[in-house]
Image (cartoon, rainbow, N blue to C red):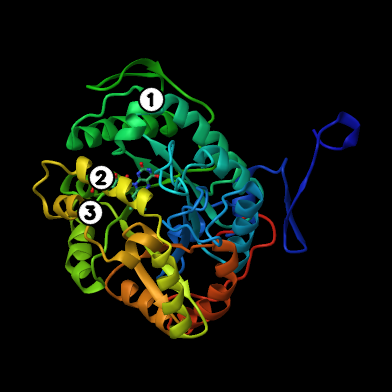
Amino acid sequence: MSGAGNGARTRDLLLGKQTLCRLSYPRQRARQVYPGLCVAVRNALLTRGNPLKLGLFGSNCSNGRSYTTVKERWDASWDNNLELAQLADRVGLECLVPIARWKGYGGQTNVNGSSFESIAWACGLLAATQDVNVFCTVHVPLIHPLVAAKQMATVDHVGKGRLGVNVVCGWNEDEFHMFGVAKHEHDDRYEQGEEWWSVIRRIWSGEPPFDFDGRYYQLGSVQGQPLPYGTGRPLMMNAGSSPRGRSFAIQNSDMHFDGVRSPEASAARITETKQQAQQIGREVQIWTPVGVICRPTQREADECIQYLVDNADWGALGHLAEMHANDARGRTDIEGMYRRRGDDPLERQVLARGSYCAIGDADHVASELQKLQAVGFDGLVLNFVNYLDELPFFAQEVLPRLEAGGVRKPYRQSSTETVLA
Ligand SMILES: Cc1cc2nc3c(=O)[nH]c(=O)nc-3n(C[C@H](O)[C@H](O)[C@H](O)COP(=O)(O)O)c2cc1C
């Protein structure tokens, strides 16, 4: 069954300039003949490699993660997102993580008022990049697991195993209201998340049609093809600092996104999370979001953050704080109290919605990021006020410093497919 005569298509898979195998070549045979080649390992950049992995967070949304009215704020157009993803791919960042947002936060600029739906966004970016992982962010209570499983499997094929999924159990009252969906109590939302993820995992494992009789889903003869690309399934992350959010991650997630008040204060907590995962035979990476302003001098970086604060979008910040306070109403755990109080330093609120920030010259920014790695973080997702304007300087100045510090290796983009050992 080969040759133009009988219509069969043969297409070369190229590694560099060397022809390795043809599509019609049995995959198992290829593994034997070319050990270490032609076998796609999924989510490769995230599962191996750099002690400190880096991603970009929030570029699918207008304003990104910054609550400021300055004219330089992020315009989340498709062209900007595409250019940014291709730049991230070229400089060797490990991933892009979107925000699933259905409604803006109001204020003068209606922060996040325009946002690309994240599964469709990931699909487009995966088609246009080579190595970088692209996440989608999916709201458990808003998207049926069978629909999500098929959409994500489809996109994972487009990306040849580079899709990841951020499972969000929901907190934003405005969005629940808009969908006409009742918001369950905090911990119950994670219970629903467990069921949702369990249905998806079972579909993706390729088990025979199954019935699911849960508290939130009662499903008959469930199945879904295709399975995700290659072997295994997309990596899954969730963010939750609450005790229940963290236990969800320990039980289910490949990556847990935790909050940082100070790097030092995170060390014991990270160790504990990883140990608890190990005790049940799991490995969990710990990540956190970081807002970055990197300028040639510390003074310029300080002036920049002052400019952002002077032009903060107070209306949007106020609305966000109000919703956070509502969401954490009644919580007695320490993270819930932080969320309710919303007393993060102003610069963090404006630049990165309350997340940890690295603001300064390249030496300072690199040392801040290394500090986070030293206390146990495996990865950081960064936001810039204007990702496209600011990433090139970061890549040029900070990445080499991280390489010199031994937390990242110089990056060489693969020439066709992600190549694996
Ligand atoms: C990195 C990161 C990504 C998040 N992405 C979203 C998102 O896209 N949409 C959303 O509604 N919430 C998002 N959240 C909020 C979380 O899903 C979660 O509600 C929040 O961390 C509070 O969880 P907790 O109550 O368990 O502490 C994100 C949080 C973080 C830190």
The residue at which mark 3 appears reads as 277
**In this orientation, does residue 233 appear?**
no
Q: Would you say the beta carbon of the disc 2 residue lies within 8 angstroms of ligand 1? A: no
Give the SS element for disc 1: helix
The residue at which mark 2 appears reads as 322
Q: Is residue 12 left or right of residue 111?
A: right
Which tag is nearer the camera, tag 1 or tag 2? 2
Q: Is residue 280 left or right of residue 42?
A: left
Q: Would you say the beta carbon of the disc 3 residue lies within 8 angstroms of ligand 1? A: no
At 36% from the left edge and 65% from the top edge, which residue is drawn?
Answer: 378
Give the SS element for disc 3: helix
Q: Residue furthest top?
A: 220
- Please report whichever mark, 1 or 2, sits nearer to the chain's N-terminal start: 1
The residue at which mark 1 appears reads as 179
Residue type for callout 2: Glu
Query: What percent of the width, then of the height, locates residue 141?
Result: 33, 29
Q: Residue furthest right?
A: 5
Query: What percent of the width, then of the height, locates residue 247?
Result: 20, 47
Answer yes or no: do the residues labelled 1 and 3 have beta carbons within 8 Å? no
Residue type for callout 1: Phe
At 46% from the left edge and 26% from the top edge, which residue is drawn?
Answer: 147
At 25% from the left edge and 62% from the top edge, which residue is drawn?
Answer: 344
Cα–Cα gap, marks 1 and 3: 35 Å
Badge 1: residue crowd in 10 Å (few <14, some 14–19, many ≥20)? few
